[in-house]
Image (cartoon, rainbow, N blue to C red):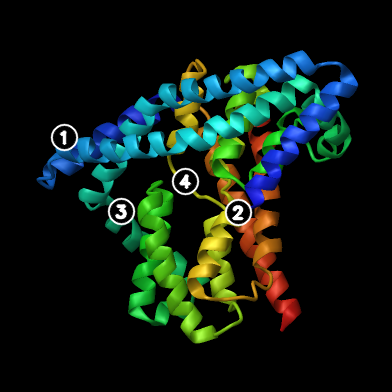
Amino acid sequence: MLMAYIWVGMLAVSVLYGCWAGTVPAVSAALMEGAAAAVELCLSVCGAVCLWTGVMELMRRSGLAEGLSRLLAPLLRLIFPRSFADPDCAAALSANFSANLLGLGNAATPAGIKAVRHMARLGGQCAGNELCRLVVMNTASVQLLPATVAAVRAACGAADAFDILPCVWISSLVSVSAGLLTARLLERKAS
Amino acid sequence: MSALIVPLLLCAMGILALSRRVDVFSSLVDGAREGMKISAGMLPALVVLLSGVYMLRASGALDAFCRLLAPALECIGIPKETASLLLIRPFSGSGALAAGSEIMRQFGPDSYVGRCAAVMLGSTETTFYVIAVYFGAAGVKKTRHAIPAALTADLCGFIMASLTVRIFFG
């Protein structure tokens, strides 16, 4: 329902502001232009998106995703000491994190949900500290290859669609750390 | 240098997969089929949202709004042209893609603002959607400090995006 309010809000503001600023003809034309631009955008990113989902599937089948989760286990054990005691939960956590890293959204969510259910069984109605940490890690994307964004850049005519990679890595890393740190500070205050 | 990252990575991945007797070609094709579904599934929401974004921009309300937020954003080093992206990012993934691609098209993907928008899109997630999915699945009602912590992470991502693009691309 939230998106409904946002969309109607956007339209109402456009019409009201258009009347005030005298831009109504442009507003009316923009409605159709926007719809056409969406199809154009979709078509122009489709090829690149397909290529990258192909690459991601290859990473999964060649065992790269598993190797990555083994590699990341020590780090995750540090962030989730209680949940990592349970081997099932630990496997789900590793799978969730490595799938996120590789941009395998379809694989990340089921693994994350499995981990979250495990954690909830320990915590009950109230979200435990580690559950909050997992959610924070998933809301701050850590992605090695942001494929869709690169596809949009390429469609807009970027010279090198992936030249933003170092920026994306640093920004993601800092934002995840900031999220986890904030969670850490707030959980201390509550207890 | 950065031009080498992706081709090299792909090449190494292909060789590794072959050495493990994985059928590289059919893996790629099966994955690409999944990508077709993603692209097609994204279209309806994009049509609806981009028509809204275009109207907002054509009316002049978006520019006025960016001007309004400009002083606050400039304070923390974020370019004011990305205001629309910042606001919709936590709520809707396709909305953010619509706003972000519009910024890239308007200012050019290799401009400072265009790069900022791309890095912002790549380094953050649809926060409230993720929170709803995970807490819903866990059957947990009290989210405690998850939302403030997640939003702090988003804000840091936006600030870092503006900062790193300035550092790497001057």
Residue at 57% across / 27% down in the picture?
A: B101
What chain does badge 2 belong to?
B
Residue type (three-letter) at the residue carrying disc 1: Phe
Q: Are marks 1 and 4 in contact (CB under 8 Å)?
A: no
Question: From the viewer's perspective, is the residue at label 3 or at label 2 nearer?
Answer: 2
Label 3 close to label 2 by CB (< 8 Å): no
Q: Indicate left or right for B126 with B78 as reference.
A: left
Task: Count all numbered tags in the image, as a single digit.
Answer: 4
Can you identify the residue that label 3 sits on?
A65
Dots 3 and 2 on the same chain = no
Res B156 label:
none
Q: Please, which chain is the residue tagged with disc 1 on?
A: B
Instruction: Give SS at disc 1.
Output: helix
Q: Tag on residue A143? A: 4
Same subunit: marks 3 and 1: no
Q: CA distance from mark 1 to mark 2?
A: 35 Å
Mark 4, secondary structure of its residue: loop
Q: CA distance from mark 3 to mark 4?
A: 13 Å
Return the chain for callout 4: A
Q: Amino acid at mark 3?
A: Ala
